[in-house]
Image (spheres, rainbow, N blue to C red):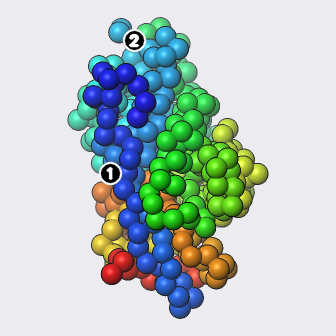
Amino acid sequence: MNGTPARARDVSRIGRTPLLPVRLRVAGRWREAGLKLEQFNPGGSVKDRTAYALVEDLEDRGLLGPGRTLVESTSGNLGAALAYVCRSRGYPFVAVVDPKTSRRNLDEMTALSAIVEHVDRPDAHGGFLRARLDRVQDLLASDASLVWPDQYRNPANPRVHREQTGPEILRHGHGRPDAVFVAVSTGGTLAGIAAYLRMVAPECHVVGVDVRGSVALGGPPGRRALTGIGAGRPSEFARPADCDEVRLIPDAEAVAACHRLRAGTGVGVGGSSGAVLAAAARHLAEHPEAQRVVCLCADGADRYEDTVYSAAWVAEHGLTGTAATEPAFDTALLA
Ligand SMILES: Cc1ncc(COP(=O)(O)O)c(C=O)c1O
């Protein structure tokens, strides 16, 4: 990551994640998918990059320093990542979370000395985003030492993905991908990667992947079970026109894709990565000419053992009946 030597010492392991090539058999043909495994960031997800960029931005603007405390609304991964970055920089951190936040992320935040504020009641839209943001505003009003990076609006969020994640995707040396698939929540990762690829590799097809029921990329609102992907309000960073295509994947299909990848390759990824993989399979089925795709896999299975990888949770959310992807696909490691 960019920065002074002192900064680099603390967080030098963020970024430069591996790209694992796997084989994907769709419509009877094997093709290649590069899995960019963001779980290899020290905090375990792509949000390490965002957290680092947000903290650095506040420091550069003179808003964060000794005596200040960071506060942010998060449903999970950004909280764990900010806890890690704040701990390495010596800033106290208050994470405003909701009941969907995974036990694993809560444990991680607590272990890294974050103060965890729970929001229990959903907002008027039935989600927790507005309720969490309202709590952040209340906290800011009651304590002048608090600083809020605002991951939903801060341009430092997409910028780090334009300057670093995007270039990494092309730098892996496996040849240029025909298409790149990125999941959305704030839309920062997608907006940054799409902006970079449009600039240097406009022939590369960029696909924004959301779950059905999320309105982040303009889809109709509805119930959804997965965490990490989707939002109850449109992205401030990424509009559908900023990428070449948007694909909305049902929760059940994303979960089935996670299981299929783990069965075929032993690689465990999170729910948003399952959605990305399912979207890539649909693309390959419709585009016989496409040889190679890249899937940004935002985190790993470790955060989802009690959800995506739990038979009880899957059944409780009614995701078993359609435990198949459309189209069906198989995965294997490259021989
Ligand atoms: C697992 C996972 N996938 C995808 C995303 C989407 O990232 P962004 O907020 O940049 O759209 C997130 C964000 O929290 C995430 O945690």
Q: Which mark, by number, is residue 65?
A: 2
Give residue 318's position: percent from left, percent from top. 49, 71
Residue at image point 60% right, 30% down? 155
Give residue 204's position: percent from left, percent from top. 64, 61
What is the quadrant of the C terminus in the image? bottom left
Q: Determine crowd level at label 2: few under 14, some 14-19, many 20+ residues with C-alpha closer than 10 A.
A: some
Disc 1 residue type (three-letter): Phe
Residue at image point 54% right, 48% down? 166
In this rendering, the answer to whether 29 lies above or below 41 is: below
Could you say whether the residue bearing mark 1 is in a helix, strand or loop? helix
Q: Determine crowd level at label 1: few under 14, some 14-19, many 20+ residues with C-alpha closer than 10 A.
A: some
Give residue 230's position: percent from left, percent from top. 58, 52
Residue 15 appears in the figure: yes
Q: Using the image as rendered, state which of residue 5 and residue 274 is in the foreground.
A: 5
Which residue is denoted by mark 1 in the rendering? 40
Could you say whether the residue bearing mark 2 is in a helix, strand or loop? loop
